[in-house]
Amino acid sequence: MKMSAPIFLLFAIYGVINVYLPLVLRSMGFTPSHVGYLLALFEVAGLVFPFLLSPFISKKGLHGPFLFISGIILSLLPFPLVKIGGFTMTAILLAMYATGYKGIVPVSDSMTNLLLGDEHTKYGRVRVMGSIGFVLMSLFLQFIVKPEQASQNTIIFWMCIPSLLFALSILFIPGLIKRQPPDAEAHVETEFEEKKSFFNAFKNFPKVFWVGLFLIFCGYLGMTPSQRFFSMYIYEYLGLQASGFLWALAAIAEIPFMFFANRFLRRYGSMKLLVFGTFFVFVRIITYILIPNFTGALIAQLFNAFTYGLYHPAAIFFVAEHTPRKNLVVGMTLYSIVAIGAGSIIGNLIGGLVIEYFGYPALFTSFSLVPLFAVMLYFIFFKKGYR
């Protein structure tokens, strides 16, 4: 599969940023609440630009050029981001970085699904390369680079290298940089239909799509402590220098479930897996506080097998299954930028304040209740209509 190498490198980038960005911001002198604000801005900037650009990319088939340009942007910005300092400049540069960082995923997912054609259930087998890239980069940083003790220049270097390699993979792997052919359905659109606004495209999505999106939103909102503040929790609350190892462990746990996700999807369907995964977010997040030590963190990270290994392929297949093909990039953007992004924005805004004023136990306990309530609402109001 042509997208295997780019996805490997894409999530190697995530292996640096997801694990160490909060710690880098803390090392620059920002308080937990300021880190939360900056991470929320990071999500907002990563939401708006790709959200508005996705219909143009889909219509023109410019997936490859967008991915290449994003990779170049991500390789150029780390130096000024880390070195200039100050809340305002950091916010501006972080927002610029986010437009490429957040925009890459829905476009790469869309391109992967286009290349897979009707075999959407095999997405997990391609995406597993991303998990491998994340694991290898996290372990390399943890045991070789040791970012908690490394200089800013070292961190900058490892933020740049995988981004540059990602851009080069899009450029040199045959067929990826070229314009993708328009979908068959696009040829029969009338002139009036072509002029419909982006927001009118929402009418093409069935009601079940929005129910699934609600579950995903609540799931990712609930995961904010483990996705955005986990490295701070490990370093500041547990007093351990094991963030990279524990992030890698979570990614390792997800690999077999992601690889065989198509079997679970055929047997249970995407909606049932979404409900199961959303409930397991509650189980995972509450575990960090019920067992507040290295063992508890290890167990909770292993639960990533369900909260991402099954959850993400189920969500991708759910979106592909319930999205008109001509709106596939829009559907993937709604999933990646709106459902995940909006959850992260709200979570980051609240999470930093909760840490600063109430501490990490309150953070994990309160956020664990969100996915639990979402699953309860599903069974009370939606289950009969959307089996």
Image (cartoon, rainbow, N blue to C red):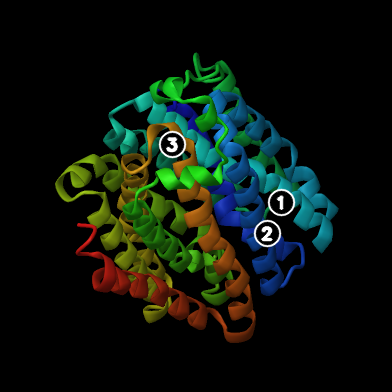
Q: Residue at x 50, y 30 (%)?
A: 6
Badge 2 marks a residue whose secondary structure is helix
Side (left or right) of 369 relative to 141: left
Q: Residue at x 53, y 30 (%)?
A: 192
Earlier residue among tags 2 and 3: 2
Instruction: Provide residue 89's location: percent of width, then percent of height.
Output: 83, 55
Label 2 and label 1: CA atoms lie apart by 7 Å
| Kind of residue at badge 3 | Leu
| Kind of residue at badge 1 | Ala
Earlier residue among tags 2 and 1: 2
Quadrant into which the C terminus falls:
bottom left
Which label is found at residue 269? none
- Answer whether residue 140 is visible to the viewer in this image: no
Quadrant into which the N terminus falls:
top left
Label 2 and label 3: CA atoms lie apart by 26 Å
In the rendered view, tell whether residue 378 sits above or below residue 271: below
Reading the image, the residue beneath label 1 is: 95
Asked if disc 1 and disc 3 are in contact, CB closer than 8 Å, the reply is no
How many other residues sit within 10 Å of disc 1, few (<14), some (14-19) or many (≥20)? many
Name which quarter of the figure residue 290 lies in: bottom left
Reading the image, the residue beneath label 2 is: 41
* Residue lying farthest to the top in this orientation: 174
Q: Residue at x 19, y 64 (%)?
A: 384
Instruction: Provide residue 79's location: percent of width, then percent of height.
Output: 77, 44
How many other residues sit within 10 Å of disc 3, few (<14), some (14-19) or many (≥20)? many
In the rendered view, tell whether residue 19 sits above or below residue 234: above
Instruction: Provide residue 128's location: percent of width, then percent of height.
Output: 36, 39
Asked if disc 2 and disc 1 are in contact, CB closer than 8 Å, the reply is yes
Reading the image, the residue beneath label 3 is: 328
Q: Residue at x 68, y 58 (%)?
A: 24
| Kind of residue at badge 2 | Leu
Q: Which numbered disc, 2 or 3, marks the residue closer to the eye?
A: 3
